[in-house]
Amino acid sequence: MGQKVYLAVIAVLVVVIFLQRSCTGERKYLPTSKDKIVYDTVWSTVTKTEYKKVPVFKRDTTYVEGDTIFVADSSYDKLKLQFDNLAKNYVARNIYRDSLLLDSIGYVLVLDTLQYNSISSRTYKHNYKIPTVTGYVQAAQRRQLYIGGGISIDKGLGLSNLQVGVLYKNKKDQIFGIQTGISEELTPYIGVLSYWKIKLK
C-alpha cells in the first residue's frame, strides 16, 4: 500500500511539472547590471572594379609662349617632322596609375587613360575591408535550480519507472542533482547525479 501511495505521489509530481512547463510562456531575457556588453568586429572584404567617363569641367585654350615645339619651322622637311611627332603624341594613349590609401583598411587603385588631349577612361579598383562592430549582452554566470521528472516504459509498452528530481547548476556550469522514483518492481529508489560541461570547438 505504501509503495502505491509513493508511486501515485511521484506520478502527480511529474504531471504537475509537465503541465506547468507547457502553460508557462517563454520569458524574454532582460539584461541586469551584472551582465556586460561584448563587442565583436566583423570585416567585410570589398573587391570591385568601376569604370567611369570623366566629363570636361573646363577647357582653357590660352597659348603659352616659350615652348619651341609649337613654333613652325620654315623648312618643309622639319615642319613635317614636327607635325608627325605632334600627331603621334596626340593619338598615343598615356596610362597613369595612382593609389588612394584608406587609413589601415586598404586602398583604391586609380587608372587614368589619356588620349586626344583628354581622359578617355578612368578605372577604380577597390581593395579594402569594412569593419562592422556589433555589441551583444553576455549574461553573467548564475546559479540555477531545476526540477523535473520522467516516465520510462519497457519494450512491452508497460510502465518501467517513474522519477522526479532536482538539478543544481553552479557558476562553473557544473550540474549536481538528486532524484527519486519507483522501479518497475514498485521499489522506491533514490540517486545522485553529477555532470561537467564539455567544451566543443
Image: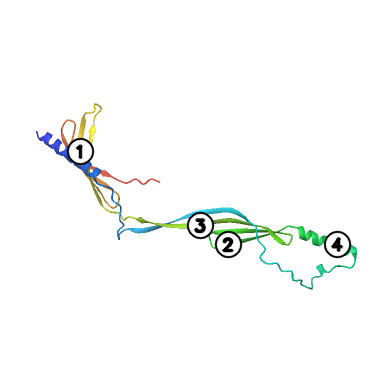
Q: Which of marks 1 and 4 is nearer the N terminus?
A: 4
Q: Distance between the residues labelled 1 and 2?
A: 68 Å
Quadrant in the rendering for residue 182: top left
The disc labelled 3 sits on which kind of residue?
Answer: Ile
Which amino acid type is marked by label 1? Gln
Pointer 2 residue? 101
Residue 157 x/y as whole percent = 23, 28
Q: Using the numbered discs, state the Cα–Cα distance from disc 1 to disc 4 in whole angstroms.
A: 107 Å
Q: Do the residues labelled 1 and 2 touch (CB within 8 Å)?
A: no
| Residue 47 horizontal/vertical position (percent) | 56, 53
Residue 178 position (above or below residue 82)? above
Precedes in sequence: disc 3 or disc 4: 4
Q: Earlier in the sequence, mark 3 or mark 2?
A: 2
Q: Distance between the residues labelled 3 and 2?
A: 14 Å
Q: From the viewer's perspective, is the residue at label 1 or at label 2 nearer? A: 2
**Against 181, is 77 above or below?**
below
Q: Which mark is residue 130?
A: 3
Disc 4 marks which residue? Answer: 81
